[in-house]
Image (cartoon, rainbow, N blue to C red):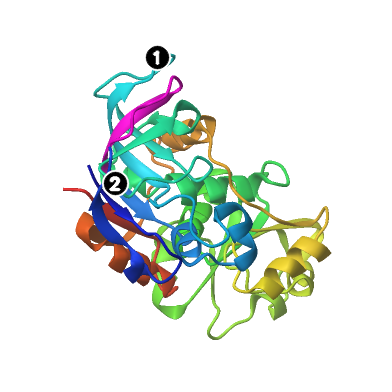
């Protein structure tokens, strides 16, 4: 089969298309013929081996996993011996972040605990945009417990991959949502249902005087002190992104019960919940750009620039 591989850490140009062996599903896996994939920050971080401490698990000198890609949507080609929930021909979507990557290929073997049937209303490209970003938003918003109706929720980075899902999920929970984004993305987040808009190029949400019961920071560009200043009494914040090691360590070391760094771990249960919200019309992936399979390197390079509106997806056709 064809796959994009890399043998050394570096920029997206390190990826090259190659012929590799098609995987065979183990007992608890399904073999998926990939129809679409999406690119995530995890892909370019792993490709570059950044931050450096991550190489302790990724491979000190060379990457352990030569095929990137964590979000996929496609059709089940074959099932392992212990699999009863899926059968060949099923349209599915899945996430491989905790299971060795491998999505940037024509076929991938996926553990059943991170697979769900694809929402019928979504194309394969739309479905591939969901798992990593939407589950990150879901787990970030719920890290401190379920959001209650009428709570004041702020989403920092509301027009990004995680942020666009977070705005919709918070609204579906009945919250009053404030979305922080740039001037050019205000219309996008307004269309997702945000009640209040903050243009960070002209207004600092920390100094605005408003206080929030929940903050989801998908960017990771604010200090612990800033986030706490913006919280209402008893409020809680979750950070799912980072812009520097200083910011990451600041939250990790100085956070606490009210402020936490959250790393998402996708499960079938989460995907099934998202599918229900999608079917109910409460959640819809937003796609910025679509690339063909042959241009995966360009897709990753574009995402790495940090200006993508919502999701960037790759079609296999």
Q: Which mark is residue 105?
A: 2
Give the residue at mark 1: 81
x, y percent for residue 97: 50, 46
Side (left or right) of 264 relative to 257: left
Residue 282, magenta (yes or no)? no
Percent of width and height locating residue 224: 76, 70
For this view, does 55 lie left or right of residue 268?
right
For label 1, count other residues whose C-alpha is less than 10 Å away and answer few (under 14), some (14-19) or many (20+).
few
Horizontal side of residue 11 vs 288, given as left or right = right
The residue furthest bottom is 202
Residue 307: quadrant of the picture: bottom left
317 lies left or right of 155: left
Residue at the far front: name it.
61
Q: Earlier in the sequence, mark 1 or mark 2?
A: 1
- Vertical placement of 132 versus 276: above or below? below
Please tell me whether mark 2 sits on a helix, a strand or a loop.
loop
Above-or-below relation of 151 to 282 = below
Residue found 42% across the figure and 34% down from its top = 275
Query: Which one is in front, 214 or 247?
Result: 247
- Work out whether residue 83 or residue 195 is closer to the camera in this orientation and state it: 83
């Amino acid at each position: 089969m064809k796959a994009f591989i890399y043998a050394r850490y570096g920029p997206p140009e390190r990826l090259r298309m190659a012929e590799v062996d098609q995987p065979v599903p183990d007992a608890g896996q399904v073999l998926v013929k990939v129809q679409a994939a999406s690119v995530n920050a995890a892909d370019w971080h792993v490709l570059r081996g950044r931050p450096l401490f991550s190489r302790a698990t990724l491979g000190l000198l060379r990457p352990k996993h030569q095929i990137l890609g964590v979000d996929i949507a496609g059709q089940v080609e074959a099932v392992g011996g212990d699999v009863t929930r899926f059968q060949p021909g099923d349209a599915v979507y899945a996430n491989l972040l905790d299971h060795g990557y491998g999505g940037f290929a024509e076929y991938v073997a996926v553990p059943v605990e991170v697979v769900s049937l694809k929402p019928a209303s979504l194309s394969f490209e739309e479905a591939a945009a969901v798992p990593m970003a939407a589950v990150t938003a879901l787990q970030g918003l719920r890290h401190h417990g379920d959001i209650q109706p009428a709570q004041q929720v702020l989403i920092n980075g509301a027009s990004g991959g995680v942020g666009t899902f977070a705005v919709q999920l918070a609204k579906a929970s009945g919250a009053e949502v404030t979305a922080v984004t740039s001037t050019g993305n205000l219309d996008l987040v307004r269309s997702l249902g945000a009640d209040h808009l903050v243009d960070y190029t002209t207004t600092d949400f920390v100094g605005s005087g408003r206080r929030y019961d929940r903050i989801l920071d998908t960017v990771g560009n604010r200090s612990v002190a800033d986030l706490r200043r913006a919280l209402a009494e008893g409020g809680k914040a979750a950070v799912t992104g980072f812009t520097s090691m200083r910011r990451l360590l600041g939250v990790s070391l100085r956070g606490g019960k009210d402020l936490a760094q959250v790393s998402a771990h996708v499960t079938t249960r989460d995907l099934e919940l998202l599918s229900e919200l999608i079917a109910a019309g409460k959640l819809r992936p937003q796609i910025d750009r679509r690339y063909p399979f042959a241009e995966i390197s360009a897709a990753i390079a574009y995402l790495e620039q940090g200006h993508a509106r919502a999701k960037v997806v790759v079609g296999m056709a």
